Image (cartoon, helix red, strand yellow):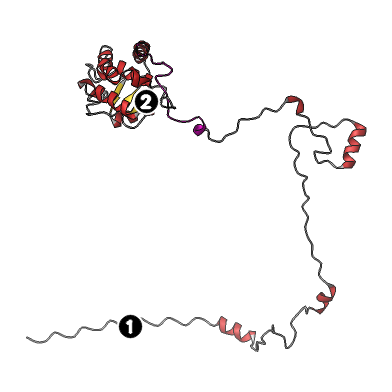
Amino acid sequence: MEALEAVGKEKLSAVNEKGFVPDEVRNTFFRKLRMKSENRSCFECPNRNPTWISLTYGIYLCLECSGEHRRKGVHISFVRSVELDSFAPEQMVQMAAGGNGKALDFFKGNEMGKLSSSGRPVDYTSKVAQRYKAQLDAEAKKLCEKYNVSAKSSQVKFEVKPEEADFGFDAPTKVPSNTLSAPSPKDAGYPEEEVLQRGKSAPAVVTHTKPSAPSVPHSHVVRKADPAVIAAKPTGFVPGGKQMAKEIDFDFDFDDLETEASKPKPAPAPAPAAPTPAPAPAP
């Protein structure tokens, strides 16, 4: 509780309009707590000089381990920076009641944490972690009564105005049930003659579904040619026109072709004889 004594009750109660203590008070408070040897290393790993904390468990974390705690969600571990974020008086009392040494000793007795014999990481969703959280909250509540600090919420408190958290979504408006009525057949798109016929025979049954658009019958367009154009268009080849058939002379005798085809095929020419080798010269 030396850090709270170094700050004093007067400075703890001197908050701004948002309910946070000045940065000078925050720096003095955490400088005193971080001087303890137990808080000079990360609660989860051997990294030195941690600058992040978990308000939920009152422990100090390095940058890497603070990211792991952020992924768990603020309902499991609420992470803050001792150098960048603002703090309310009850949150500072929460950190004064906690500390790495107290948390390490508690979880070590339950075979959790880096100092335990098994080295098993702390399961922050277990009943052991919930028991330590309840114990820390009870001690912080007593300190708040001692230093006249209102223990509103020592866990989640952001420096965000209510109007800044509005994302521009309008709340859904509830329509009275007595204003809902089924559309009339005329409003639903039926022809006037059909509405009159329906009224004479039987009451029309109108559903709440939107009537589909009337289907348009498919039609095939048949183009009729002008008789005058058909009569003027030539039906064959016109002499002197662009499309003229070429006249071919077919003056030959089919009898000569049959006689030529009936002649026997000539015998194939004999293969040439192999050349005789030249005599070898006399020795």
Relative vertical location of residue 215 with respect to residue 20 in this rendering, above or below: below
Q: What residue type is labelled 1?
A: Pro
Residue drawn at point x = 61 percent, y = 86 percent: 256
> In the image, which disc is placed on residue 21?
2
Q: Which residues are the magenta region?
A: 146-165
Toward which corner of the image does residue 52 lie, by quadrant? top left
Look at the image and tell me whether residue 123 can be seen: no
Toward which corner of the image does residue 67 lie, by quadrant? top left
Please check the rendered image and state whether residue 155 is part of the magenta-colored stretch, yes or no: yes
The residue tagged 1 is 272
> How many C-alpha atoms fall within 10 Å of the one at disc 2: few (<14), some, or many (≥20)?
many
Nearest the eye: 75 or 12: 12
> In the image, which disc is placed on residue 44?
none
Nearest the eye: 133 or 218: 133
**Residue 233: x and y, percent?**
78, 78
**Residue 79: x and y, percent?**
36, 26
Look at the image and tell me whether residue 21 can be seen: yes
**Residue 53: x and y, percent?**
32, 25
User: Image quadrant for the C terminus?
Assistant: bottom left
Q: At numbered mark 2, what does the secondary structure look like: helix, strand or loop? A: loop
**Residue 278: x and y, percent?**
19, 85
Prevailing secondary structure of the magenta residues: loop
Residue farthest to the right?
A: 200
Q: At numbered mark 1, what does the secondary structure look like: helix, strand or loop? A: loop
Residue drawn at point x = 35 percent, y = 81 percent: 271
> How many C-alpha atoms fall within 10 Å of the one at disc 1: few (<14), some, or many (≥20)?
few
**246 relative to 159 in the view: left or right:** right
Residue drawn at point x = 81 percent, y = 38 percent: 187
User: Image quadrant for the N terminus?
Assistant: top left
